[in-house]
Image: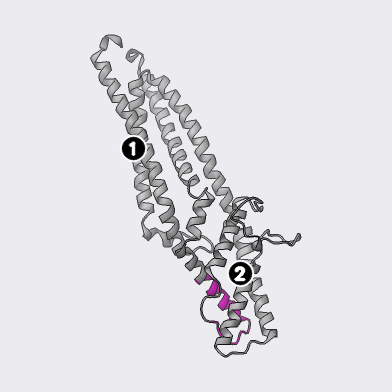
């Protein structure tokens, strides 16, 4: 077998080793993202834990207060204008609809039907009615505590302004044309990259086996490439876990605290994927070395 390994074979092995390296990276990145961004349960945990809900609560309250005071509200309401429970229900529902390419998954347990629009002419499958109702009620309660009158005419005007604002920002900008539209495509892309990258990488490994003319050589070369790429990926995952990177990641409507929660939720999965691939590579390289030693001890068999 060793006698068949020529300079041409070495060249082909080097070429397909490069191709395998690229495909392994595509497979690893695709699998890591598919297991995190591509899994609705993982995203749901990251978006609806306490820290993330607090960030959304503060953002929505500040935005609502700004709109209300701009719509002739006598004084600014105090306290949070939306509860974490309502936010969690809305986020779970919006995520489920987004993950299903804008369609309502009829059997999903994450769906809260009070957030699903019953208007057949509505461009969105979602409604913010529970959220808007809570903002209105809490605004009125806050003004009452402050001893401030809240005439019906002004209340109707403020409610209309708040609804128009959040319908545009959340339903239109975010869900219809922003992150809600991009998320399912990104998840699908990640899953496709993992599947296609894995299949092509396996095919290239078979070609590498043919041109290497030796099990020992094939295992050593492919194993070393595998664990080296996995070690670099693990290092990349460690860097991705640094909180310093969070402020530089910009997602529409998603604050830095939410990005930090995604880091905490997703990076361990990426590290586990890199670790498993590294172990596979080390085992392959180790077997190749053992076979090489065996070949040296039995030269006549080669």
Residue extending farthest to the top is 300
For label 2, the residue is 131
Quadrant of the image occupied by residue 127: bottom right
Quadrant of the image occupied by residue 248: bottom left
For label 1, the residue is 228
Residue 60 sits inside the magenta stretch: yes
Other-residue count near label 2 (Cα within 10 Å), few / some / many at <14 / 14–19 / ≥20: many
Quadrant of the image occupied by residue 29: top left
Task: Provide residue 263's location: percent of width, then percent of height.
Answer: 42, 55
Other-residue count near label 1 (Cα within 10 Å), few / some / many at <14 / 14–19 / ≥20: some
Residue 150 sits inside the magenta stretch: no
Q: Is residue 169 above or below residue 181?
A: below
Position of residue 118 in the picture relative to residue 296 (left or right): right
Task: Provide residue 210's location: percent of width, then percent of height.
Answer: 42, 20
Sequence-first disc among 1 and 2: 2
Locate the C terminus and report the quarter of the image it occupies. Answer: top left
Q: Is residue 16 something that shows in the picture?
A: yes
- In the structure shown, which secondary structural element does the residue marked by tag 1 occupy? helix
């Amino acid at each position: 077998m060793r006698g068949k390994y020529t300079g041409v074979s070495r060249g082909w092995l080097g070429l397909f080793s490069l191709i395998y390296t690229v495909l392994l990276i595509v497979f690893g990145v695709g699998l890591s993202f598919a297991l995190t961004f591509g899994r609705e349960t993982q995203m749901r945990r990251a978006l609806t834990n306490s820290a993330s809900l607090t960030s959304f609560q503060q953002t929505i309250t500040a935005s609502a207060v700004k709109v209300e005071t701009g719509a002739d509200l006598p004084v600014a309401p105090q306290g949070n204008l939306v509860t974490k429970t309502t936010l969690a229900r809305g986020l779970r529902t919006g995520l489920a609809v987004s993950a299903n390419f804008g369609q309502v998954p009829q059997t999903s347990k994450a769906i809260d039907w009070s957030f699903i629009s019953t208007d057949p002419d509505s461009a969105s499958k979602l409604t913010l009615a529970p959220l808007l109702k809570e903002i209105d009620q809490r605004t009125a309660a806050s003004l009452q505590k402050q001893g401030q009158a809240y005439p019906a005419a002004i209340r109707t005007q403020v409610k209309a302004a708040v609804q128009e604002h959040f319908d545009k920002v959340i339903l239109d900008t975010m869900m219809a044309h922003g992150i809600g539209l991009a998320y399912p495509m990104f998840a699908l892309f990640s899953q496709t990259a993992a599947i296609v990258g894995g299949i092509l990488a396996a095919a290239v490994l078979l070609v590498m086996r043919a041109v290497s003319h030796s099990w020992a050589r094939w295992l050593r070369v492919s194993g070393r490439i595998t664990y080296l790429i996995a070690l670099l990926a693990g290092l990349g995952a460690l860097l991705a876990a640094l909180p310093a990177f969070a402020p530089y990641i910009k997602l529409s409507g998603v604050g830095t605290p939410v990005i930090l929660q995604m880091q905490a939720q997703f990076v361990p999965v990426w590290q586990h994927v890199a670790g498993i691939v590294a172990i596979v590579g080390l085992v392959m390289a180790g077997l190749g070395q053992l076979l090489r030693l065996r070949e040296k001890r039995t030269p006549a068999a080669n």
